[in-house]
Structure formats: C-alpha cells, structure tokens
Amino acid sequence: MKFGLFYELQLPKPADRDQWGPDAERRIYHDMLEQVALADSLGFDYVFEVEHHFLEEYSHSSAPEVFLGAASQRTKNIRLGHGIVIFPGGAGTAEEILYLLGILLDPANKKLPFPVVFTGPADSADYFQQIHEFIGATLGPAAQARYRVIIDDPAGVARAMVQGMAEVRDYRRQASDSYGFNWLLKIPLEFQRPFEVTHASMRALRLSLDQPVHERAANLRRAFSGIVAGNIKEYGVNAIEQYGPFELAGDPIIMEPLDKLLRSFVAQGRMKFTGAEYKPCYRLVA
C-alpha cells in the first residue's frame, strides 16, 4: 500500500468579512510546500495537485505545475503527479475539459504528450459518451485523440496514467525539458485571462467552424463558463434575474450538438444543486 497527498487549495473567506487577508494565498501555498517537504521526509510516496480556474474558496490552484516545480526543489524521493483524471460532472466539468483541449489543440502544443483520462463507475458511461460525441462533432477527431475514456476500471486508469507519465518523461528527456516544470507547454495570454461573463460577452462569442480548432474550443469553454456563472455564481444569477437568459449564437453544426448536450445535462439533473425545477440560464438563438 502506498500513501500520498492530494491538494485543492481550499481557502474559505473569513467568517467576519467578505474578503481574504492580503497574505492569505501566499500563506496557503507556503504551508502546502512545508507539508510536502515533511511528507517526503516521512516516506510518503506521491503528491498530486488539481487545476481549477475561477473557483473562489473551493480551489485556488490555477497553476499546479508551478507549485510542483517548487515542490521538486524541496523534496528528494516523493513522486510528483503529472496527469489529469476527469470524473463525471456537469457544465463545470465540460468547461474544464474544453479549457484543457483548447491548450492541447494549439499547434504549438501538438507534439506534447499530456495524459488525460475520463473515468467513473459504470453508470457514468452515458455521460462520457455524450461528452465524447460532443467533442467529436464540434472539435473533431484530433480533439478526441487527446484523451482516453476508461469506465469502471480503476486499475486500467492507473495503468494508463503510468504509461502516460512515462511518455511525458521520455519526451522531456529527448527535448531537454525540465522534469519539474513544463517549459515547452504554450498557453497564450488570452487563455490565461478570465472570461468576464455578461449578456453582451456571451452573445458576442464566435462559435464557428471557420476558426482554428483551439480557438473554437476556447470559445466553447467560455460559453460553459457563462452557463456555470448563470447557474450558481451570485453575479451571474443576479444578471439572469435582471436581464433574462444569456443568448448564444453560432453555426448550426456547432449549436445542434451543444443543444443536445445541454438538454442531456438538464434531463440528468446535472445543472442544479437543489430539488427545484431547473430554469435554463441560457437561450440558443439562430
């Protein structure tokens, strides 16, 4: 049996005010690095860190490779995780998948090995099949080739990740890239900037087949960011209550699979957290 650490960097706001102190995020990162160094000295086997964007309080971990690079300078034996396993979710999971695909489909990253697995129990098979079909219909087979779907097989997932990490290690050795930081991975500045969700920005999103596939993935991610905001984030919920649903427009060949996927999320109860009937925060228009 092996033991390891798994971090998300939760940082709740103080009970007596609505913002963090000026030192809060620096402190949580340094505390985590101290914990990893201690775990290494105690013989722990591995450490993994997630990647989330714009999830205040729940996860302040937007750049795990930067952290893992710092951890590599403070440890000797502990293994640092470098791979992504995605479990069933809803609009937020689709948002994160599309963000990742937007980066991996960039021509600058075409040759980079990056192990990604979609997995879950047997009853998640339909969910991932819908995601897989949506990606194929909107982004094509090149996008589908950047991940694997492995259902109800934890050992198979582990084997896939071990194989993927070996490919990453071999590629970095051949390319003279660092093991502690992925210097060859290119993330354009536009991908790093938050998407400001408003009715105008949602309506202005370009969802078309005549744009580069990585830009199309990025705009689909922004569309799902808006849906997540309209579903659960205070500013998004307030905007929907005041001005009505967000509008999304694009080529029919993209909008039809998008409509099918969103309808399946509603039917499966993946768009709400309460027992109340879901009222869509979006409207697809011609």
Image (spheres, rainbow, N blue to C red):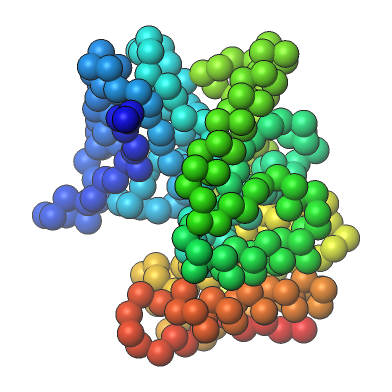
Q: Residue 228 in the image: x percent, y percent? A: 48, 67
Q: Is residue 237 visible?
A: no
The residue depicted at 46 percent of the width and 33 percent of the height is 64
Picture layout, residue 262 above or below residue 17: below
Is residue 282 toward the left or the right of residue 37 in the image? right
| The C terminus sits in image quarter | bottom right
Along the line of sight, which residue is nearer the eye, 91 or 281?
Answer: 91
Toward the bottom, the furthest residue is 277
Residue 110 visible in the picture? yes
Residue 188 vs residue 69, the one in the foreground:
69
Q: Residue furthest left?
A: 16
Up/down of 185 relative to 211, above or below: above
Residue closest to the eye, 46 or 49: 46
Q: Residue farthest to the right?
A: 210
Q: Which residue is drawn at the image coordinates 46% and 20% (left, top)?
A: 69
Q: Nearer the viewer, residue 133 or 72?
A: 133
Residue at 59%, 82% in the rendered image: 263
Compared across the picture, whether 132 is left or right of 162 comes to: right
Point out residue 108 in the picture as x, y percentages from the top left corner: 77, 33
Residue drawn at x 50%, y 56% as measured from the top left: 152
Above/below status of 228 relative to 213: below
Quadrant in which residue 165 is drawn: top right
Quarter that holds the N terminus: top left
Q: Is residue 33 left or right of residue 160?
A: left
Q: Residue 176: x and y, percent?
A: 68, 11
| x and y, in percent, of residue 163 in the image | 61, 31
Q: Is residue 43 left or right of residue 53?
A: left
Q: How many marks?
A: 0
